[in-house]
Structure formats: structure tokens, C-alpha cells
Amino acid sequence: MSIRVIEDKCTGCTLCVRACPFAAITMQDKLAVIGPECTLCGACVPACKFDAIELIVEQRKPVDKDRYRNVWIVAEQKRGVVQSVTYELIGAGRRLADARGAELHVVLLGAGMDGACKDLVARGADVVHYLDHPAFADYQDEPYSRVLCRLMNTHRPEIVLCGATAIGRSLIPRVAVQINTGLTADCTGLEIDTDGGLMQIRPAFGGNIMATILTPNHRPQMATVRHKVMKEAKPDPKRKGKVVTIEPLKEDAYVRAKVVDFVEEVEATVNLAEADIIVSGGRGLGTPEGFKLIQAFALALGGAVGSSRAAVDAGWIPYSHQVGQTGKTVCPKLYVACGISGQIQHLVGMQSSDTILAINKDPDAPIFTVADFGIVGDLYKVVPAIIDRLNQR
Amino acid sequence: MKIVVCIKQVPDTTNVRINPETNTLVREGVESIVNPFDEYAIEEAIRIKERLDEPAPTGKPATTGKPATTIVVTMGPPQAQAALRQALSVGIDEAILLSDRAFAGSDTWATSYALSKMIEKIGDVDLVLCGKQAIDGDTAQVGPGVAVHLGLPQITFVKKIEEITPKKIRAERMMEEGHQVIECRLPVLLTVVKEINEPRLPSIRGKMRAKKAEITTWTAADLDVDQDSIGLKGSPTVVHKIYAPDRKKEGRVLDGEPADVATDIVSELKRLSLV
């Protein structure tokens, strides 16, 4: 694989220099020169109006794509409860299956979850593949990936989606490498292109760029999907579908990395990822006591408390509250940022929230560029006034 | 006992900005750093070595025989040497760089394949450590990929190693609402999260040692790799398009007296059924 500038065709117009997201192209003697920073992303190829850049991609012999059909969802359950990310995947998967004129299959590994199978059908599954065995009651990497690899090889789905959760991000990379196909992490958008392929859209470089990823020559096309980005599929009790039982093989339950205990952590139950409303405070609070006001505000709105990295680094609030690239990614219905300037690493963790309210005294703070509502002012005056107003209702 | 740490040199994405005119990343002045999550993996490898080499309270050493060795590996351009030297400066014993244009364009499948071949060549590795993810791609897929290519079990998102001996490990895997306690015999691959430790700073002596250290460099020819499985050719996924996210919103700015602003915003939130 390589990239080259066809010098006869290059006019020195610099369009490619501007198109390169990695600043890898420079002009030398009015000719484009591609430097070592090049990642072979190919962004410059369509940008060149003179067909002067050629990306030579030799690929292995592609798989016979016609042998692969249907969209599969890997359900996530914890202690017998199907997690809401599964319903989001069904919503997205149903749309993709319909676009491909294909069926939507859901695979559920667990124990004693017959009721959940009916609900998965009601939410949109045409077929539920259900493995009911005590050895699969709790998630473990090896048994789960072994069963999934076998199902993939037998049923040959065209598309496989899984939640980008702790479980999904441990399980699915194992499966994708084992069955020798591509996997795109943490997608925020999924579309079918004109050739019927899956366009997997995701942020990279800490949210500074968006990338569309394709899996052109391998099947299935696999992706993990960010929680709280897609809409949940609602149940319709009239929907029909079938439940197929999977029998585990004796060796499926064999584990080397064995889960011996699960410990719930009170601190971790600041489950920001699930909160519908989040009120966050940042360096602009000025003092650790400022979080008392944030807490009161969160209480008045019925939300959870978040924070910027600056406030965590200052020791004002524990790390479990941190929103952003090195903290949690959240997508609540309402996100309120108080005294947060809006560093890029914070923005990537919250900018997909439905509605954003920012309160900051600096009118030029970057947080206002992502806010639906901006209040320029002293948060110690504005926030108490809003709390008063809320409590009057 | 051999401990291998896989690291990546990344641009410091927290300082990356978009040039609004050209919609490209402004790379000038953006430093290359060791992926922050990998720093925790480096620190943990050194701590494990110290723990195993330290004599037990009974007076007998915890490990029988040879002391543990820590080796840091990376795949990247020649300048990725700087990342390896940083690992050496805090106490890692050896460093190996895999550098060859043949690996350019590798996705997570091909990257994990190449790293697994490095670890195979090192041989007799008991423990592989990775950061949970790299901050440029944020995929968290390379660690599990390496484990599968090597046929190893894995413990991802490790926040604490409760116990480790040359034979087995007991570790806590961080999940959304708590942690799993996992026991496993070695060899195993771990990916670690930032809660696991506080990385140390290099000493002056460590810096001097790192500066002078010999860094082993391998190319594709040094590894037993299938040429069709590396680089862009060995990558099932391809980047089709890259663009700047549309971040600008036409937000409504409210101003005036706090009481008026409060009334205004609360009625807006009501209109949106948020309160």
C-alpha cells in the first residue's frame, strides 16, 4: 500500500494541503510532497481536482459478501436484566435491517431470562438467539466470545452491533480478531452507503475530527455503538418474532480468567452515563464549596452532579464525577455547565447532550459554542435565582 | 518472569485545535507524548517487578530464581523512540521499536497482529500490559486483539491488582457500577485504567540512563509476519472520510438581571419539558 503524487498532473494548487487533516502535505517547488506524518487516510485523494494523488491499496481477496445476510445485535445483560443500550442497538439495527431488506437478530446469553426474550421481540427483533445456562449468568470474556464466534461462523451476519460499554469493549474485539474481520469502536452514527456497505461514523482525536470507517472486503461489518446516542426501540406487544434456543457445548464454559466476585461501588453509582439531567461545575466555581451550590442546583432539577477535569485536579470533587475525554462521556437530555470554560477534552464528553445550558462570566468561553442556551454572568448570582424560580413551581 | 508493556506515541490531543479556515488539525506546537493510559501500564509493570523481587516477610524472595524483566514495545515511526526512552527513564529495563513503512495504515486488527508478533519473538512472556485505550483513536481494541492473536486470556480495565505471583493474578476489572474480581493463571494480558496507580516521575539518573540506552529496532523482516496481514493491506477497516465535526450551534444568549434571566431560562426548560 502506498500513496504518491503524480507529478505531471500536480498543478501546485494546494487544495490537498488544506484537505489533509494531519498536515502531512507541503508544497515544494510548486509540487505537493507527502511527508512521513501521512497516515494513508486518503482525505487528499478526492480533494485533488486533477487526479494527481493516487492511493494504491492492494487488498487481500475479499470474502464472498453474498454469503452474509442480516443484522445482529449482541444484547447486554447484567444479573438477568437487559441493559438499555441493547434497546438503543435494536432501534439502530432495525433501521439498518430495513434498509438492507434483511432480518434483525438479537443474541442473548444469560440464565433464566425467557421473559426478556419476548420483550426483545416486542422491541423489534425478528429472531432472538437465546442461550440459557447458569455458566453464562454473568459476563465472562472467554465463554461469551467462544459462543459468539461460533454463531458468527454458522449464521454469517452482514452487520453486528454491540454496546460500547465495559462489557462490549472487552468482548467484541476478541470476537472480531478471532473471526478475522474489522471492528469500529464507539460509533455515534451508522448509515448504509450506496453499495450497501455500513458507514461507521465515529469521533477520533479526542473529538477533534469525525471519521467515516468502512469494512470493504470483510464480513461481518462489526461496530460498537456509544451508549445514549441512538434512540431506544419501544416495545410493541403485537410484534411477532421467534426465539431460538442455543445449546452450549461442554467446552464453552471453560475459563482461564475467572470472575470470582462482583463488588458494587457506591462511588461508581454516580452513574452519570444514565442520568437524564447533569449539572456540572468547573474551575469558575473558585472554591470547593461551590459544589454545594451545584448540588443544590442538581437537586432542584432532579439531576446528577458532574464536573470538569480542572475541578477534579484541584481536588474539589472525586474523579467519578468527571465528564470529558479522560472521564465519562455523557448524553443527558439536559446538561448544565456552570463555570466551565469548555476545553476540547470536556466538550467531547458532553456535546452530544440534547440540550446544553452554559453559565459563565466570560462571553468568549468556548462552552458557548456548543450551548443551546448561554447565560453570561456571575454564576453565584444567576444559579441561586434559577433555583428560587424552580422551587416556586 | 517477563513483563511486556505495549505503548503508543500519540499527539497530545488536549492541545489539538482545528484551524477554522481550513478545517484541519493544527499540528504545529502539538507535542508527541506517551499515551497517558500507557503511563499507568508502565508504572504498574515496574511496581509488579518491585513487588515480585522484594523478599517476602519470611525472608525468602517472592520469586524463586531470576528477577523479573520489564520490556516496553511500540510500533511507530523512528521518532517513537522518544516514547520508549521515557519508559526507560522511569525504570523499564529494555525497549524495542518496530518501525517499517510496511506497517503504515494499520488498523486495530493489523496493529494487534504486529504487536503480538513482537511479543512472540521476545518469547516466554508471562504478562502483557496495555493502557485501556489510546487518546488519539480511543478504540480500546488493540489490547484484546493482542490477547487473541497470542491465544491469551485477558483482564480489561484493571483498576487494582490484588495479588500477583509468578503463577497467577487476582485483579479488579472496572465496570460501570462496580468491579469484577477476576482470577487467572499467567500468562495473561491486562489493560489498565487511570485509577490503578500514580505514575512516578523520572529521576535524573533515570533520564541519563534512558538517554544513553540502546534501543533495539526491528523491521517487518525481523518478524515472522504474513505480509498480507500487516499495514493497510492487513487492515479490514479503512478510513473512508475524515472531517471536522460541526460544533457550532446557534445558541440563544440570555442576559439581564439574574431574576429575569432565571424566569426566562426556566420557561425555556419548561417549553422543552425538561423541568
Image: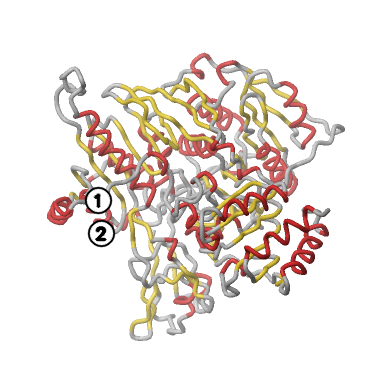
Q: From the viewer's side, name the closer residue of A79 and A4.
A: A79
**Three-letter code for the amino acid on which mark 2 is drawn:** Pro
Q: Is residue B155 above or below residue A9?
A: above
Q: Residue at x 54, y 63 (%)?
A: A284
- Residue A197: image x %, image y %? 62, 51
Compared across the picture, whether A322 is left or right of A371 comes to left
Compared across the picture, whether A377 is left or right of A40 comes to right
Q: Residue at x 70, y 59 (%)?
A: A355
Q: From the viewer's side, name the closer residue of B261 and B246.
A: B261
Q: Residues within 10 Å of mark 1 (few under 14, many from 20)?
A: many
Task: Indicate which disc, 1 or 2, sits on the residue closer to the N terminus.
Answer: 2
- Residue B210: image x %, image y %? 17, 53
Q: Quadrant of residue A24?
A: bottom left
Q: Residue furthest top?
A: A250
Q: Quadrant of the N terminus of chain A?
A: bottom left
SS category of the residue bearing label 2: helix
- Residue A216: image x %, image y %? 54, 51
Residue tagged 2: B78
Q: From the viewer's side, name the closer residue of B155 and B40.
A: B40
Q: Residue at x 48, y 39 (%)?
A: A173
